[in-house]
Image (cartoon, rainbow, N blue to C red):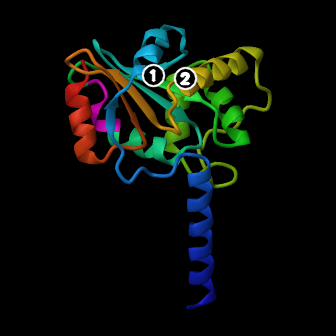
Amino acid sequence: MNRYRRNLLRTACIAAIGASLLGIAAMATAQQTQSPDAAKVLAEMGKATVIPEGSGPRVLYIFFDANCPYCHELYTALRSKVGKDGLEFRWVPVAVLTPSSVTKGAAILQASNRLAAFHENENTYGKGPNGKGGGIIPATKVSHTASAILNANNALLEATKSPGVPTLLYRDKQGDAMMMVGPPNPQQLKEILASVK
């Protein structure tokens, strides 16, 4: 095995171990489940600061970290669904993965157009100053307001007892509170979007 391949494998292993330690490793079997914790948090989501995308009566909350690769994967998978079938995605920014999650989250929250800043972060994912994570330029100063928003949203994520991001919360057509942790595979995503009340 040549030196390049050995270094590439070593980097991949380190990244996988780091991701699992952060609680964001890809769930081999991400599952949508009924959850009493999800029901409690859904009742509190009026306190969250969200970035709405699309418009409609069928609401899917998505907790995301600006540096999360699996959140980015979900963002990409949802592009063709925005504004369709009465779905509204409410992206809930949190800062739980890395130190720059706070400054990138703040850059999104402090922007005059949060949705445009969110899109910038995701559309340039992996193309930022260090080539990792969200592509938005981190805020040089985190405002008290942005810090308070991230702390409040982090507390809501913690209340779900979710081990990582992305975490999806919604009510299904039977009115049950549902939660999924990790990026759903294409079939799961199709089922979730069809079942959102």
Look at the image and give the residue range highlighted in magenta.
78-83
Q: Position of residue 139 (x, y in %)?
A: 73, 31
The tag on residue 146 is none
Relative height, residue 34 to residue 175 (above, below) = below
**Residue 7 counted in the magenta span:** no
Q: Which quadrant holds residue 17?
A: bottom right
Displayed quadrant of residue 8: bottom right
Residue 80 magenta: yes
**Quick one: label 1 or label 2, which is nearer the N terminus?**
1
The crowd level at tag 1 (other Cα within 10 Å; few <14, some 14-19, many 20+) is some
Residue 146: x and y in percent read 69, 19
* Callout 1 touching callout 2 (CB < 8 Å): yes
Q: How many marks?
A: 2
Q: Residue at x 76, y 25 (%)?
A: 142
On the rendered image, what quadrant is the N terminus found in?
Answer: bottom right
Q: Nearer the viewer, residue 135 or 64?
A: 64
* Residue 57 visible at all: yes
Indicate left or right for 80 with 53 as reference. Answer: left
Instruction: Check the picture and name the quadrant holding the C terminus.
Output: top left
**For the point 45% across and 52% down, which residue is it?**
26
Q: Is residue 110 visible?
A: no
* Residue type highlighted by circle 2: Ala
Q: Is residue 178 left or right of residue 91?
A: left
Circle 2 sits in a helix, a strand or a loop, which is it?
helix
Query: Whole-percent x and y of residue 194?
Result: 19, 29
Query: What's under tag 1, amino acid-wise?
Result: Asp
Q: Residue at x 53, y 39 (%)?
A: 164
Residue hosting label 2: 159
Mark number displayed over residue 37: 1
